[in-house]
Amino acid sequence: MKTNNKTDQQAKCASKSKCDATTDQQESQPISSDELITCVNGMDDSLYAKLGLFGRGFISVSNQGVDMAVRSDDLSGMALDNDGFLWWPEQGVRMNKNVLSAVHAFDNSSISAPALECDFDTSPGGLAFYFLPRHCDKRLFWDVMDTYRVGGIPVQQLMLQRNKMMPAFNNCPCCIARAERIMSSVETHILSRVLADLSASGKEVEFQIKSKHVGMTCQWVPGELMLSEGHINVTGKGHTLHINAMAVHALRIYKHKKCKQEYSVMMCYNSLGEVMLEMSVEGAQYLSLWNKICQSNHSDYKQMPNGVFVGI
């Protein structure tokens, strides 16, 4: 595990992850505050079907403190199902169009690559597509986006609009103090230790982000961990995972049986009681290991009578 001192900024659209073709990592990259962001008709299914025309890129899913991205050669979406979900089966992604509020296209001039971000009722930028600079047809992207254009919005106005969409987290003084401790020593956080162990073991992990607006399920082997001021970044082959450890309010650890195999499962919750992230790995032996880590003196979590570990 290595520590990265670079500040991890997660401001949507004005400072959003870029996809680098060489490192397969996402890094925060701001765009000009006076740039006009293109608004496109995201309710037209044909828009997503055409994403594969532009080249390779990442599809990214986020939900209140966690985001995960997977690299793909074809970002085309599939048809809607009966429940109003649009699917990307190979990437394990689905989107609920019933709660889609806006779709924005912009060009990150510093890496000369376009991007498309989807806003939902309570999750701005919850689904995004970032194209790789040396593997995309920028001219074709903008030619197609012009046919779906419904207007434009300045970056600063979009930022204010998105801030209003975010759910309110009422942090008490204890939660604020706990967040400050995690920010100064994220390497001792339970998730840092668990992910470091899984990275060292070479075991494949199933990661799931589940919410009412998007869902993503991916199986991959965690590689390098980078820790910075309360944030955990994990890279794997064609995958990245970012967790705001300060937002993880509670943890639930349990055993699950699937296809006659036992799995150890950890679920992470925010302070609103919503599931941020679920990860599972084959083998019941991780259950006792994870419980031991949660019960250690370095843990910021206390086990409740129902077995759930809550931040203290």
Image (tube, helix red, strand yellow):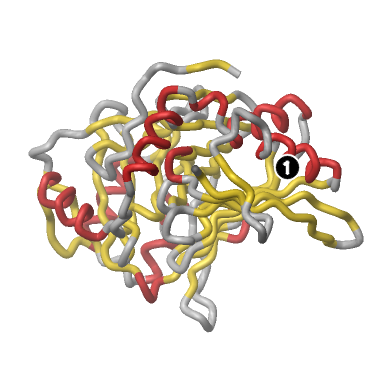
Which residue corresponds to the image point at 50% horizontal and 17% vertical from the top-left?
3
Q: Is residue 27 left or right of residue 114?
A: right
Q: Residue at x 51, y 81 (%)?
A: 83
Q: Is residue 57 above or below residue 22?
A: below
* Res 127 → quadrant: bottom left
Element class at badge 1 = helix
Q: Is residue 134 visible?
A: no
Q: Considering only vertical position in the picture, is 110 above or below 157? A: above
Residue 118's spot in the image, x, y percent? 33, 57
User: Residue 91, relative to residue 110: is it above or below?
Assistant: below
Tell me which residue sits at (49%, 43%) in the image: 312
Q: Nearer the viewer, residue 312 or 192?
A: 312
The N terminus is located in which quarter? top right
User: Three-letter amino acid code at disc 1?
Assistant: Asn
Q: Is residue 225 left or right of residue 137?
A: right
232 on left or right of 54: right
Query: Picture coordinates of residue 200 (x, y %)?
Result: 74, 24
Q: Position of residue 283 (x, y in %)?
A: 85, 46
List the single residue furthest toward the bottom: 82
Q: Of all residues shown, which one is farthest toward the right? A: 260
Q: Mark 1 = which residue?
A: 291
Residue 132 visible to the viewer: yes
Q: Nearer the viewer, residue 225 or 230?
A: 230
> Closer to the camera, 90 or 249?
249
Residue density around tag 1, few if under 14, some if 14–19, many if 20 or more, within 10 Å: some
Q: Residue at x 50, y 23 (%)?
A: 22
Number of numbered labels in the structure image: 1
Question: Where does the image place residue 183, in percent across and percent down from the top left?
Answer: 41, 28
For residue 19, what is the image quadrant? top left
